[in-house]
Image (cartoon, helix red, strand yellow):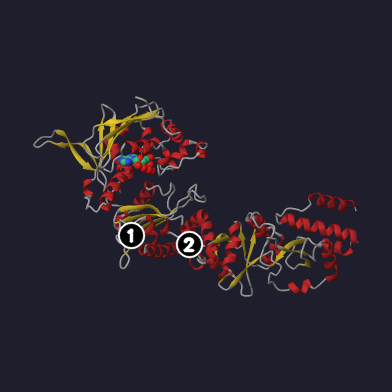
Amino acid sequence: MAKKQFKAESKRLLDLMINSIYTQKEIFLRELISNASDASDKSYYNALLAGKTPDRERYQIRLDVDKVKRTLTITDNGIGMNKEDLEKNLGTIAESGSFRFKAESEEKDGVDIIGQFGVGFYSAFMVADEVAVTSKKEGEDTAWNWVSKGSDGYTVTEAEKASTGTEIVLHIKENTETENYDEFLEQYRLTDLVKKYSDFIKYPIVMELTKSRKKEDSDEYEQYTETETLNSRIPLWKKSKKELTEEDYKGFYHAQRYGFDEPVKTIHTSVEGNLTYTALLFLPGTAPYDFYTKEFKKGLALYSNGVMIMEKCADLLPDYFGFVQGLVDSADLSLNISREMLQQDHQLKAISKNLTKTIQKELAALCSKDRAAYAKFFDAFGRTLKYGLYSDWGMHKDVLQDLIMFRSSKEEDYTTLKEYLERMPEEQKYIYYGTGETKEKIRLMPAAEGVLAKGYELLYFTEDVDEFAVKMLGTYGEKEFKNITDADLGIENDTEIEEKYPELMGKLKDALVGKVADVKTSSRLVSHPACLSTRGAISIEMEKVLSAGPDGEMAKAEKVLEINPNHVLFAQLESADEERLNLLANVLLDQALLIEGLPLENPVEYANNIWKLLEK
Ligand code: ADP
Ligand code: MG
């Protein structure tokens, strides 16, 4: 009989599984049990949709071991697969929902990949050298047998099977020098694995266990067998909080593949009344590898009374809380509801609103009570919160403004805006910030000198979204935000000094006509001879961000060259003839541009100007 080939991507993944040096081979069992559970869910759900009253207790997942034949069999009485399903679901990885296998992942080493993804059905090949699937789909008469020894292909033939459902027989590999496979035929190991990974599966996972007991009226022991349910079955979120330990929550978090780190915060809440639901939410401590890409699917799993309706319900979370993982279970939601109708659903909207409030409250509490944990969270997802502030024309200000943090000149770690305000001296008019690549670079900016010398606190904006976010915010606690490169810093004495030297400033302005909007003496500079500031809405950093976009040419900052009258160079400016003044003006401007990280219009001219000055 002709072998069929796996689709190219599936073959790559299979090879990875077969040759895997991944230490956690044991997860294959979790994967197969989860598939069996999904198949039972589908069967139950289908029956409900058909208007029947299905019996949840009908479903069972069975493990059987034959040590002589070296087989481990996983049997379910779920929905089953017909010939097409087998070919489609097991022949091409593209059909597998949980594994998004990409070309680039080949370049990383296989160890990571397997740990990070749900690997699904093919993980069986980590422990088995042959996998045989016999399945009969509900409502159909013919059963089918799918067999594969690995990446050289598979066969599908008609088979005998009395009941509907799926039976998967793994022929367990022989031990090697470095790997022990025998353990996957041991009952103690299998029962441990079920407890570890699949305890919350709602269907009974049963296995015939060999036990020993003392014989009656004798000191001898005898062996007997007994079929036992290995898992506790009650969905974790339905257990009372008191019963649950941090370990339980963590185990669930990992089993559900919400992340492979530790959650920074777990929120388990039940609401009763008009709206009845239970939510189990996790704040991950690190961003998933694809979090900041389009591939990432935000959302919470949605259950109706313990039956999963949707795996990732995006409508339950606002985008700015898209990093939250977890699930919502509500008896108020109808099972029959379609995905389209779900979007309009009042209950769902109300739940989403409630959850948003809950998450905000929990984040705020974490921020004030456990700053280290919040900082870890913020490192991973702070960007999303800031985008949230900026998006939808600042509509989510009230939710988010106290959740964002910045680095600052007065704090080792992050500061909130509220804390900034509390430290602010009374006469300080604005909340000052500087923008740049790193906080060190911002601190060394000429424009920072004056503000810091005044003893005012400076916020370091190192992400491109920062300035846009506070612009959208406008004010915090009635204080406006002020970029330190703004021409008007609202610091005293500004005007007094500015009015000096009008003649010299006029000459410099003439020398730089078309290049800057103005030249003035500065009160903000201490050790630098000159710096750039801006007037109006667009700052230099915004110009950089915007000039990368489609309207780049239009988005120019209105630049002012500020000169330090207390710098030794100032005397040279005063005594220079016209030609030398021209040279000095251009060099000062170009240097100020370089310090700001802006490109020079004419680098050759800049170099020549310096040479000319040195020759003079
Ligand atoms: P995923 O579970 O993420 O979809 P898998 O690789 O684990 O990916 O499984 C691929 C597909 O094979 C499943 O989506 C399902 O359609 C089908 N499948 C696997 N095991 C079973 C089973 N025991 N019963 C019915 N269908 C199954
Ligand atoms: Mg699966």
**Distance from Cα at disc 2 to Cα at disc 1:** 24 Å
Judged by depth in the image, the label closer to the viewer, 2 or 1, is: 1
Residue 604 in view: yes
Amino acid type at image mark 2: Cys
Amino acid type at image mark 1: Thr
Q: Is residue 24 left or right of residue 272?
A: right
Residue 25 in view: no
Location of residue 172 with respect to 499 vertically, above or below: above
Q: Is residue 518 left or right of residue 10?
A: right
Label at residue 278: 1
In the depicted view, which residue is nearer to us: 13 or 53? 53
* Residue occupying the point 79% across, 73% down: 499
Label at residue 571: none
Within-10-Å neighbours for mark 1: few <14, some 14–19, many 20+? many
In the depicted view, which residue is nearer to us: 242 or 149? 149
Q: Position of residue 30 (x, y in %)?
A: 34, 41
Q: Quadrant of residue 133?
A: top left
Say whether disc 2 or disc 1 marks the residue closer to the N-terminus.
Answer: 1
Q: Is residue 18 left or right of residue 51?
A: right
In the depicted view, which residue is nearer to us: 498 or 155? 155
Label at residue 367: 2
Q: Position of residue 310 (x, y in %)?
A: 36, 53
At mark 2, the secondary structure is helix
At mark 1, the secondary structure is strand
Location of residue 433 with respect to 221 vertically, above or below: below
Q: Position of residue 301 (x, y in %)?
A: 37, 53
Within-10-Å neighbours for mark 2: few <14, some 14–19, many 20+? many
Location of residue 325 with respect to 6 vertically, above or below: below
